[in-house]
Every structure is written in structure tokens, then in C-alpha cells.
Image (tube, rainbow, N blue to C red):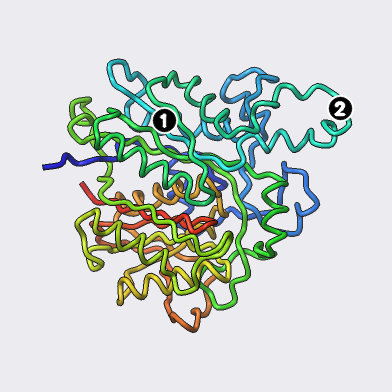
């Protein structure tokens, strides 16, 4: 019989705040963190709401006691802050004798710093060598690995919005197959002008707080953040005299390749990935009591995901998108929302889908509208990305 693969630690940093309890408190009180930009300089700072972490990069450096001019980007610093909590939460500050790996996800890498020097680079003006290597997403991963002295396995995943969900899948597989004793999985992304301009060019950013699954939805709100999960076998966890938080029971990645930036409107990719995650978990649709949906509040995603949920579940269990609290944190979103799903499981509750008024006519689905206590055994977390790179995760109570 296969041993249970469990989540033994979690750490998170979003616009809601730093730490598991701070994020849960905001979710349970239905308070979002979407505001105008304070730190990132862009022409769109007051045009759109963002999930910006209200701590400067220099303050992050000071808090982590890192010297200035060391090449650490905001993306890396947010990752370090979240990963510190995950390791502490897992009672894993010292991991001698264990084979430990890190699977880190990011889409922007050091773009948050490099873009500041773009025009100076064109003019060959000034010294920007400090950040010249950070444009490679792997630089962020290696800085995290070096900071926490992780050497056994270090790799980077960048599949847009499903990146850190895929990191969790890879980490779970590596542990299950015995390649690692412990896999630290998650992702980190900072807000950048590059990202904002790209999504704005696609006409996918709402000028108001986003409205997932609402008929009048008009785009997403971008955010930043970092989140990490510690994955190991239940036996390893117990041998360390540590109690697991949840079981990483099922997962699937499915690439439908329908379009570069849009999902199949019928939800074929979303349907297949959720169906196969259930099969991997040896569960049926009625075994799921809550879905943390991808729910970007874009016209195409929410229609597609709603159609897929209705097709697979029939009577759809309580579901909500938590991007209306944090903004879309891109590569970090899969891990952020996996943690939110596990918090729901741990606290036996479901989170509200904010800003909803009227359902999408075709599906007529109504998301969870209030924070409520619920009896949960199994929860699902969806992450769907550009190119049809879809991931679905299932976590179960221990």
C-alpha cells in the first residue's frame, strides 16, 4: 500500500499580510487587500486596484538582515520571507540527514528590478551588473536554495498561472517515488510594469475590484506574493516527531493547448484535469466538499471553469475564488490557493467569493457568498494557465 504523502508545513506572504494566521483572519472576515499602488512606479498606479504588499523592498532587505546591493530582488525576498515560515511551521529549521529539495515557481524572476534599468541599458548608462543575472527565473530559485542551504535538488518551474501548482505536483511525485525525503514546493512573484502592461494589452484588468463568476465580471486584479508547502511521507513526518497538516491526495496536470491565452469555452481542459485529479486521489465528485476555483474574473476563464465544474460535479459543491482578496499572484497563485484550501480544511470552513451579484447565464452557478463553518474531508484547488496548462490539486484531512 502506498504511503500517504502529507503537507507538514506552510508559509505565505500576500497583500493580506505575512503569515498563515494573518491571511486566514482576512479571509474569514471577508476583507480584501486590493488598493492602488504605493511602491511600484507605473502610469497605471491609480488606474487599477492591485494586491501590492505594503512593505518596501529596502524594508524587506532590512528585516531579513541582508546587505544592500547584493542582487536579491523583491521576488526573491518575498520568497525567503514565506519560506522561513514554511520551514518553521514544519519544524524543519535543521534538515541534516534528510534529502531535501526545492521546486520553486516564478514567472517574472528579477524583472521587477531589471525593468528599472531598461532605458539605462539601452544607453549603456550606469552600473546594473548587480541584477544582470536575475532576469533568469532560476536565479531566484538558487538564491532561495543558497539562503536555506538546500542542495540535494533545486529546480524552477515557469508555466504562468499554474506554475506553483505544478511545483507541488512535481514535489509530491519526487517524494512518492523516493527521490526526496522532503520537497519544498511553491512560488513567488513580485508586481512588475512588464506584467501590468502585458495584461492591460490583453484588456484583462478590471478598473474596479474583480468579480469572479459574476455576469458583469470584467477582468482580473494583479497581485504579488509568495507561498510554500513542505511535502513529505507521513512516516518521515512522524519520525521527526511532527504532526502533518493535511494529505496531498490527488493531483493532475493537463495541457489542452486550445489557445495561447484563452481556455476552451466549454471547459474541456478544466474538466479533464479535475476528473483526472479525482481519479488519482481514488475519489468521486461527491467526495469534494469545497473548491478553491482558479476564478480570475476574466470573461473566458470563469465561463470555462464554471462549465467544467457543472459538467463534472452536476450539483457543484461550495466554491469560491480567493483572488478577489489577494489579486492574481501569477506563479505564486497555485501555492497561495493550495494553502487557502488547506486552511479551509484545517479550520473546517469555506471562504466567501467577494463582489458577486448575478451568475453567468450559461452555467447559472452561484459561488459561496459568505464565510461559513463547514464539515470538510476533501478540498480541490484549481490553477489554469496560458497555453491551456491546467493543474488541479486535492487535499484531504488526516
Q: Position of residue 48 (x, y in %)?
A: 71, 59
On screen, 147 above or below 120?
above
- Closest to the observer: 2 or 27? 2
On screen, 347 above or below 274?
above
Query: What SS does tag 1 mark?
Result: strand
On screen, 183 above or below 295?
above
Q: Residue at x 44, y 80 (%)?
A: 363
Disc number at residue 124?
A: 2
Alpha-carbon distance for marks 2 and 1? 36 Å
Q: Is residue 110 left or right of residue 268?
A: right
Q: Residue furthest left?
A: 1
Q: Residue at x 66, y 62 (%)?
A: 205
Mark 1 burial class by Cα count in 10 Å: few <14, some 14-19, many 20+? many
Question: Mark 2 near mark 1, Cβ–Cβ under 8 Å?
Answer: no
- Closest to the observer: 66 or 348? 66
Q: Quadrant of the N terminus?
A: top left
Q: Position of residue 162 (x, y in %)?
A: 47, 50
Q: Nearer the viewer, mark 2 or mark 1?
A: 2
Can you identify the residue that label 1 sits on?
A: 102
Q: Position of residue 306 (x, y in %)?
A: 43, 72
Q: Is residue 15 left or right of residue 348?
A: right
Mark 2 burial class by Cα count in 10 Å: few <14, some 14-19, many 20+? few
Disc number at residue 223?
A: none
Q: Earlier in the sequence, mark 2 or mark 1?
A: 1
Q: Residue furthest front?
A: 257
Q: Is residue 269 left or right of residue 326?
A: left
Q: Residue at x 44, y 56 (%)?
A: 255
Query: What SS does tag 2 mark?
Result: loop
- Closest to the observer: 350 or 225? 225
Q: Position of residue 117 (x, y in %)?
A: 79, 33
Q: Residue at x 50, y 39 (%)?
A: 105
Amino acid at each position: 500500500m502506498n504511503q500517504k504523502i502529507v503537507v507538514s508545513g506552510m508559509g505565505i506572504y500576500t497583500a493580506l499580510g505575512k503569515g498563515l494566521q494573518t491571511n486566514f483572519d482576512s479571509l474569514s472576515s471577508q476583507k480584501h487587500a486590493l488598493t492602488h499602488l504605493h511602491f511600484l512606479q507605473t502610469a497605471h498606479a491609480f488606474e487599477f486596484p492591485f494586491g501590492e504588499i505594503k512593505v518596501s523592498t529596502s524594508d524587506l532587505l532590512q528585516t531579513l538582515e541582508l546587505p544592500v546591493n547584493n542582487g536579491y530582488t523583491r521576488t526573491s525576498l518575498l520568497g525567503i520571507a514565506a519560506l522561513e515560515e514554511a520551514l518553521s511551521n514544519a519544524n524543519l529549521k535543521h534538515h541534516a540527514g534528510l534529502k531535501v529539495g526545492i521546486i520553486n515557481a516564478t514567472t517574472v524572476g528579477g524583472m521587477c528590478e531589471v525593468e528599472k534599468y531598461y532605458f539605462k541599458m539601452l544607453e549603456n548608462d550606469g552600473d546594473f551588473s548587480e541584477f544582470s543575472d536575475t532576469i533568469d527565473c532560476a536565479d531566484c530559485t538558487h538564491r532561495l536554495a543558497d539562503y536555506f542551504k538546500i542542495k540535494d535538488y533545486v529546480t524552477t518551474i515557469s508555466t504562468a498561472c499554474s506554475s506553483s501548482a505544478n511545483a507541488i505536483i512535481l514535489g509530491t511525485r519526487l517524494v512518492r517515488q523516493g527521490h526526496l525525503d522532503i520537497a519544498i514546493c511553491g512560488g513567488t512573484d513580485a508586481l512588475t510594469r512588464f506584467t501590468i502592461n502585458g495584461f492591460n494589452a490583453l484588456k484583462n484588468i478590471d478598473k474596479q475590484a474583480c468579480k469572479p463568476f459574476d455576469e458583469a465580471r470584467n477582468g482580473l486584479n494583479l497581485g504579488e506574493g509568495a507561498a510554500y508547502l513542505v511535502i513529505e511521507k507521513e512516516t518521515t513526518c512522524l519520525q521527526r516527531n511532527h504532526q502533518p497538516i493535511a494529505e496531498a491526495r490527488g493531483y493532475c496536470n493537463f495541457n489542452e493547448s486550445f489557445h495561447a491565452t484563452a481556455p476552451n469555452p466549454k471547459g474541456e481542459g478544466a474538466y479533464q484535469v479535475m476528473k483526472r485529479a479525482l481519479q488519482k486521489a481514488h475519489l468521486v465528485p461527491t467526495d469534494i466538499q469545497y473548491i478553491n476555483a482558479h476564478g480570475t474574473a476574466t470573461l473566458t476563464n470563469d465561463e470555462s471553469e464554471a462549465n467544467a465544474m457543472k459538467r463534472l460535479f452536476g450539483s457543484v459543491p461550495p466554491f469560491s475564488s480567493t483572488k478577489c482578496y489577494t489579486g492574481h499572484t501569477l506563479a505564486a497563485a497555485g501555492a497561495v490557493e493550495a494553502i487557502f484550501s488547506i486552511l479551509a480544511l484545517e479550520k473546517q470552513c469555506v471562504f466567501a467569493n467577494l463582489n458577486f451579484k448575478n451568475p453567468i447565464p450559461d452555467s447559472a452557478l452561484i459561488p459561496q457568498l459568505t464565510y461559513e463553518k463547514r464539515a470538510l474531508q476533501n478540498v480541490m484547488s484549481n490553477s489554469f494557465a496560458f497555453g491551456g496548462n491546467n493543474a488541479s490539486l486535492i487535499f484531504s484531512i488526516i
